[in-house]
Image (cartoon, rainbow, N blue to C red):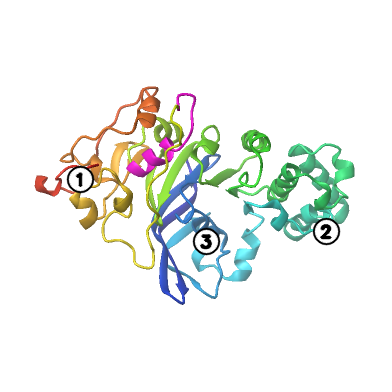
Amino acid sequence: MEKILEVKDLRISFHTFSGEVQAIRGVNFDLYYGETLAIVGESGSGKSVTTKSIMRLLPENNSEIKSGQILFDGKDLTKLKDKDMQKIRGKDISMIFQDPMTSLNPTMKIGNQIMEPLIKHQNMSRHAAKERAIDLLKLVGIPKPEIRVDQYPHQFSGGMRQRVVIAIALACNPKVLIADEPTTALDVTIQAQILELMKDLQKKIDTSIIFITHDLGVVANVADRVAVMYGGKIVEIGTADEIFYNPQHPYTWGLISSMPDMDTDDEELFSIPGTPPDLLEPPKGDAFAPRNPYVMKIDLEQEPPFFKVSDTHYAATWLLHPDAPKVEPPEAVKRRQSQYQGTVGVGNGVALEKDKFPGKKEGK
C-alpha cells in the first residue's frame, strides 16, 4: 500500500512557567491511502497534540517542534511557511473536532460555514458552493437539506451538529481526515450513528482517516489499524484485530480490561492504578513502569525498543524479550485472545543479560 502521510521521530515540547513539558517524545507512524488509523490512549498521552501538529494548529507562543518530520505528498509540513500551510489545511487535510458547538459559528448559517472552504479553496461561485453544501448535508444524513442549509447551529441537535462539522471537513474532498474524539460529547445512540456514518463515508469517498479516541471500544469496528499511545510515545501498533485480540503491551491490556463486555461479572470495572507520567521530567526507563503490575528491574533502567510480533504488529515492552519471564495477561484479555487465531512471535530486540529480568515484583 502507498503511504500518504509519514510521521518520523516527532518530538514536541511546551514551554511553561514550570519548565519544558516534553509532550511528544519520538512518535513514528505511517498512514496509507484509504485506511483508517485509530490512535488511542488516556487523556494526556499525546494523541491530540500529535494530530494538531499535522494541521500546524499548536499555539505558536509556547509550543515547539524540537525535531522530526511530517511528510505529506513529499512535503515536510514542519518546514512549511504559514501561507503555504493555509493552502493545505482544510483542503488536503481536514479535521473534525470534539465539540461541534465550539467548532461552529453560532452567528452564521450552517450553509455559509460549509460554503466557506469551497469558495476559498475550490474557487466556487456562491451558487455552486450552496448546491455542493446541500449535497454534503445529504451525504452526512441531514434530512431536508434544502431547508436545513439556511438554518443556524442552535436549530440542530448535538448529533446533527456533529454531522454538519463532518460535512464541513469533507467539503473539499480532503486526502486526510483527522477525527479528534468526534463522538465524546454525544450520547451512546448518537455515537453509534456517527461511527456508522464514518464507516459509510470511508466507502464513498477516497480519503484516509486518523481517528483519535481514549476508548478502544469506539474504534473496534471502524479502524483498520490501531496505535496505542502512552506518555508521549506509541507503545503498540498493529491491525485492529491484533490490538483487540492479541495485545502485547501491559498498558493495552489495561485499556482492554477496562472495557465492559458480556462476560464482565465484577461489581466494579477495572481501572489502571496510578496516573500518567509527569513529562516535565520524563522517566528514565519505561514510562508505564510505575503503573505496570508486571514491572521488572529493566523497566526502571532502560526504555524498551519495539519488538516484532508480526509483520504488522509491534510492541515496546520488555515482556517480549526472549529472556523475559512468561506472564499471563488479565482474564479480560485472555477471553479475547481465545477468539484470535494468530500467533505471537518475537523479533530482534536488544540482547540483555538474564539477571536483568528478576521477574515480577513481590505482591504483584
Which residue is disc 1 drawn over?
Answer: 361
Q: Which residues are magenta?
A: 250-264
Judge from the rendering whether residue 92 lies leftward or rightward of residue 161; answer left or right: left
Query: Three-letter amino acid code at disc 2?
Result: Met
Which callout, 3 or 1, points at the residue further toward the start of the chain? 3
Q: Residue at x 87, y 50 (%)?
A: 151
Q: How many C-alpha atoms fall within 10 Å of the one at disc 1: few (<14), some, or many (≥20)? A: few
| Quarter assignment of residue 233 | bottom left
Which type of secondary structure does the marked residue at label 1 adopt? loop
Assign a secondary structure to mark 2: loop
Query: Label 2: few (<14), some or many (≥20) within 10 Å?
Result: few
Q: Position of residue 296 (x, y in %)?
A: 21, 47
* SS state under label 3: helix
Up-down relation of residue 15 to residue 297 (above or below): below
Q: Amino acid at mark 3?
A: Ser
Q: Residue at x 58, y 64 (%)?
A: 57
The answer to whether residue 285 is left or right of residue 241 is left
- Whether the magenta-drawn stretch holds residue 255 is answered as yes
Quadrant location of residue 55?
A: bottom right
- Marks 2 and 3, Cα distance to the nearest angstrom? 28 Å
Query: Mark 2 and 3 residues: CB-CB less than 8 Å, in contact?
Result: no
Marking on residue 108: 2
- Is residue 67 visible in the rendered image? The answer is no
Q: Nearer the viewer, residue 202 or 25?
A: 25
**Residue pointed to by mark 3:** 53
Q: Is 225 colored magenta in this rendering?
A: no
From the viewer's perspective, tell me whether residue 143 is left or right of residue 335. right
